[in-house]
Image (cartoon, rainbow, N blue to C red):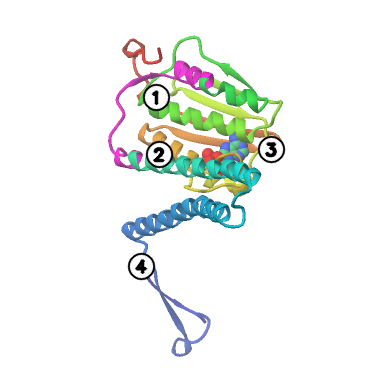
Amino acid sequence: EVRVAPVNPAAEPARRLYVMTFRDMTEARRMDRMRTDFVANASHELRTPLASLMGFIETMQGPARGDEKARDQFFGIMLEQAQRMARLIDDLLSLSRLEMRAHVAPEGSVDLGKTVTHVVDTLKPMADDLGIVIELSLPEAPAVVTGDVDELIQVFSNLVENACKYGQSGKRVEILVTRPEGEGPLVTVRDFGPGIPKEHVPRLTERFYRVDVETSRTKKGTGLGLAIVKHILTRHRARLIIKSVPGEGSSFTVKFSPAETARTDAIKEIYK
Ligand code: ADP
């Protein structure tokens, strides 16, 4: 895109100065830029725990050699850093697999109530540790969508895990599955934590975007959870609606499109 604009438009034509600006915003260029940023971010995220691991190994080979107490403590930290790298690699692989499947529509039939119940059962020990009670509310008739059950399990796991991690100990997390008349089913995950300042909300699904990097790290986050959620939901033609009131809490709602509602009798029993 080329633009020519006068710097002093009020001046008589012979005295006008012009600036010419060039902007190349072709889709391909933007994608290239995003890819480069992503590789740079991913490398940085992997380098941080790796640098820490190398530092501890060197200390154990040098100054702390023979210090058994320090060694035990260092091994603990080193394991945490290695686990952090493993989580990052798992999330990066998930994203890359999702990108490869981005243009293939999912095919199975998924009962949302059963899927969410399965997620809650899996995450209950973590919620217990954090002092959070998960309350689940399901519709009377099953809410069924066309989708990939493993991917939807990942979506709800990420949302419920975030609600527990960033929610408040001693408070509850609510999960609500509803089937509004004439619309696609909704799954809402709501917490009563500190909430998210408004300016961050539109950016939460960007890769590696965190409101607070330190908090995300201490809570074992990778910054990729909501990016994965968004990818999966796009493939399912579903939307993520985020609402948050600082000081009161946040809600993350997955809205499936009505066309994706599948027939109940097609459900395969895959949970047992
Ligand atoms: P992370 O691995 O850091 O949790 P996510 O992509 O899952 O990454 O989330 C991105 C960021 O969004 C988090 O770092 C956190 O700052 C914010 N966030 C996500 N869910 C919540 C929530 N329920 N309450 C408050 N902040 C949240």
**In the image shown, does 42 or 102 lie closer to the viewer?**
42
Is the residue 104 above or below the residue 210 in the image? above
Q: Which stretch is magenta?
A: 98-121
SS for dot 1: helix
Is the residue 85 above or below the residue 159 in the image? below
Among the two numbered marks 2 and 1 on one chain, the one whose residue lies closer to the N terminus: 2
Among the two numbered marks 1 and 3 on one chain, the one whose residue lies closer to the N terminus: 3
SS for dot 4: loop
Question: Is ligand 1 closer than 8 angstroms to the Cβ of mark 2?
Answer: no
SS for dot 2: helix
Q: Which residue: 40% across, 15% down?
A: 271
Q: Which mark is residue 231?
A: 2
Is the residue 241 above or below the residue 138 in the image? below
Q: Which residue: 39% across, 41% down?
A: 95
Measured from the top left, where is residue 7 in percent x and y?
A: 50, 80
Task: Find out whether the residues at labels 1 and 3 contact each other: C-beta distance under 8 Å.
Answer: no
In this rendering, which labeled residue sits more in front, label 4 or label 2? Answer: 2
What is the spatial separation of the Cα atoms under label 4 and label 2, in whole angstroms?
Answer: 30 Å
In this rendering, which labeled residue sits more in front, label 2 or label 1? Answer: 2
Q: In this figure, which residue is indicated by the disc labeled 1? A: 258
Q: In this figure, which residue is indicated by the disc labeled 3? A: 194
